[in-house]
Amino acid sequence: MARVHIDGDTLVVVIEGLDKLWALKSSLTIPLSNVRGATADPGMINETKGIRAPGTHLPGVITAGTFHLDGERVFWDVQNPAKAIVIELTDERYARLVVQVDDPRAAVALIEGAIAQA
C-alpha cells in the first residue's frame, strides 16, 4: 500500500510495509508540474502489465515494482484493485504510477486539487 501526500510543489508517494520489498522502492517524489492527473481505476489491474523488471507479480495477490510496456515504464503497487489509483505523469522516469491507497477518492481529490493550485 502507498501513502500519497503533497509537500510544497511535490507529490510524494511513500510505499509502506512489506510492499517496499516487493516493489523494490520506498518512495517516489514527483514535481507537481509533471503530474498530469489522477483517477481511481480498479479496472487497471486487468490491463497488460508488460515485462517486470524489477518487481513482483503474483496474479490475484500482488503487482509491485517497475513494468515495461510499449516503451514506457509503469510503477505498480497494488494488492486490492478496488483501492487502486492511476497517476499520469509527463517528463518523468515513469509514465504512470498505479498504487493502492486507503481512500482512493480522497487521494485523487488531493492530487487534482494540488495540480489546480500549482
Image (cartoon, rainbow, N blue to C red):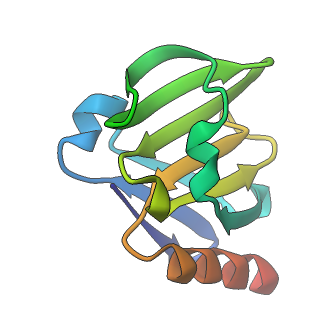
Quadrant for the C terminus, please.
Answer: bottom right
Quadrant for the N terminus, please.
Answer: bottom left
Q: Residue at x 71, y 20 (%)?
A: 69
The answer to whether 111 is drawn above or below residue 85 in the figure is: below
Classify residue 55 by image quadrant: top left
Q: Is residue 71 left or right of residue 31?
A: right
Residue 6: percent from left, percent from top: 53, 74
Q: Is residue 29 left or right of residue 112?
A: left
Residue 58: percent from left, percent from top: 35, 25
Q: Residue at x 75, y 76 (%)?
A: 115
The answer to whether 53 is drawn above or below residue 99 in the figure is: above
Labels in figure, total = 0
Residue at the extreme left of the image, as rendered: 18
Q: Residue at x 41, y 65 (%)?
A: 101
The answer to whether 92 is drawn above or below residue 80 in the figure is: above
Q: Is residue 105 left or right of residue 112?
A: left
Q: Residue at x 76, y 55 (%)?
A: 34
Q: Is residue 63 left or right of residue 87?
A: left
The answer to whether 107 is drawn above or below residue 74 in the figure is: below
Front-most of residues 31 and 73: 73
Residue 76: percent from left, percent from top: 50, 39
Classify residue 110 by image quadrant: bottom right
Residue 111: percent from left, percent from top: 64, 74
